[in-house]
Image (cartoon, rainbow, N blue to C red):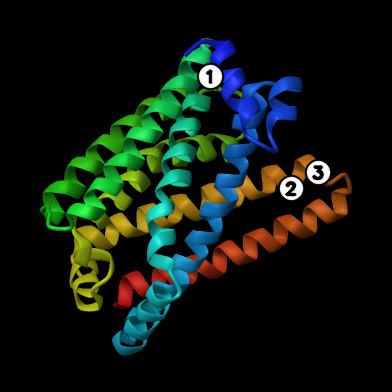
Amino acid sequence: MTDDMKTRILDMVSGISVFSQTRGLAYIITWFHRVTGIILVGYLWLHVYTLSYLAHPVEFKVKIELFRNLGFLYFEWLLAVPVIFHALNGGRLILYEIYGNRRDDVAIRWVIGLSIIYVVFIILMVFMGNQEVSTIIYWSSILIAALCVSGAVSYRIVSSDAGWAWKLQRISGVFLLVMIPAHMMFMHLNLSAGHDTYEIISRMRIIFIKILDMLIMTCALYHGGYGLLSILKDYLSSSAVIRNMTLLVIIISMTFAWLGLKTILFV
């Protein structure tokens, strides 16, 4: 797709044509990355809160039914869009910042193309609805891939002059780049895995899955909290307000971390 073609497509979309003409595709991609990040942080908090009801299976089942009746099932399908875009665009930023990839136009095309393929694949699995995969084999393979990729990035940036908070943000992001799209795919490969109360409890009682869930939750809460603070710092000029917002984000993240840890350990 040529730059001229991309511009014409963007110009046809109401509301962003002005930005495509004045600031270009990179500006829109940056904002979409931030918006999808905020959406995913909100969903993460809701997800941890909902799963905390697993300690009371009957109440959890009522919650699931309520969400289903409110149309959350369709929202869960649509969540594939921000999940895969944010993950792949995060990977593009890693390539740009850490590996010096300056062919950003090519990387953006790959992000858009692979995002479309992933979303279409998820939709196909939703309509098929009869597939199944081994939990241990699937997650063992995904964890190895995630550790290899995050290990490669860690090796690259560990000796840099950047602060450890920034380094952990990038490392956790690369780990989640593999894990979160894989998590969504698993939920649709095994439809009962995310919707049947006793199936969820049975899976979460496996020690390997407990460790995996703690890794994902820790990385997601840190990555999301850091991302929120990065956005806030771009728009807040008062150091006192920034400190207060930082404290608030830390308190919220720690609250959900405690809630999630309690659920993982005692379900």
The amino acid at mark 3 is: Tyr
Is residue 217 shown above or below 108?
below
Q: Which residue is mark 2?
A: 232
Instruction: Report which quarter residue 13 is drawn in.
Output: top right
Amino acid type of the residue tagged 1 in the rendering: Tyr
The answer to whether 132 is drawn above or below residue 19 in the figure is below
Mark seen at residue 96: 1
- Report the disc number at residue 235: 3
The reply to whether callout 1 and callout 2 are in contact (CB within 8 Å) is no
Name the disc covering residue 157, or none: none
Instruction: Identify the secondary structure beneath mark 2.
Output: helix
- Crowd class of label 1 (few under 14; some 14 to 19; many from 20; radius 10 Å): some
Identity of the residue drawn at 55% across and 21% down: 97
Instruction: Give me the C-alpha separation between circle 1 and circle 3.
Output: 24 Å
Locate residue 77 relative to residue 185 in the image: left or right: right
Looking at the image, can residue 100 be seen? Answer: no
In the picture, measured across the screen, residue 129 lies left or right of residue 150, that is: left
Q: Position of residue 42 (x, y in %)?
A: 55, 60
**Count of numbered labels shown in the rendering:** 3
- Which residue lies most toward the right here? 238
